[in-house]
Image (cartoon, rainbow, N blue to C red):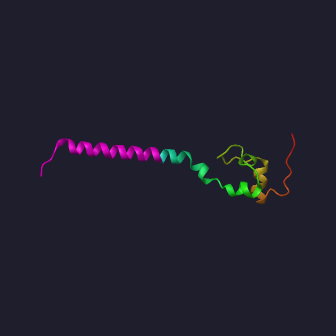
Amino acid sequence: MCYHPNTGRRRRNQVKKVLKASAITVMVSALFLPFALVTPEYTKKENKLCAFCHLAVGKPDLTEAGKYYKDHHTLEGYKEKKP
């Protein structure tokens, strides 16, 4: 069997490229994880946008309406406070 010195180097470079691409894919996926955890059925059920209950999209911080919904599992009976 004949061994060429560049064969091992090429293979290592290919492996590095695949690992780098995989790492980038994982990092990008992690950025979108909060959006994947969002449950759009709440917006359909209550006919409200996410921002009605959340201070920012993809963030767990809740508005007064969000706190009410968390406690009652519905927005029925919620009175929006006027400034």
Q: Tell me: 14 left or right of 4.
A: right
Left/right of residue 37 with respect to residue 30 in the rendered view: right
Which percent across, then down, holds residue 51?
Answer: 73, 46
Residue at 78%, 59% (x, y): give it: 74
Give how far across and how far down residue 10 sits, in percent: 26, 43
Q: Is residue 14 above or below residue 45?
A: above
- How many discs appear? 0
Question: Residue 72 vs residue 40: left or right?
Answer: right
Task: Judge by depth and name the residue closer to the eye, 68 or 74.
Answer: 74
As drawn, 75 above or below 17: below
Q: In which quarter of the image is residue 23?
A: top left
- Give me the residue at 42% from left, 47% from top: 22
List the single residue furthest toward the left.
Answer: 1
Q: Give the magenta range.
A: 1-25
Up-down relation of residue 73 to residue 20 (above or below): below
Magenta stretch mostly in which secondary structure? helix
Task: Give the vertical position of 41 relative to 58 (above or below).
Answer: below
Q: Is residue 59 magenta-colored?
A: no
Farthest residue toward the bottom? 73
- Most extreme residue toward the top is 83
Residue 70 in the image: x percent, y percent? Answer: 74, 56
Question: Does the magenta run of residues contain 12?
Answer: yes
Quadrant assignment for the C terminus: top right
- Percent position of residue 39, x then y: 66, 56
Q: Residue at x 76, y 54 (%)?
A: 47
- Residue at image x 31%, y 45%? 14
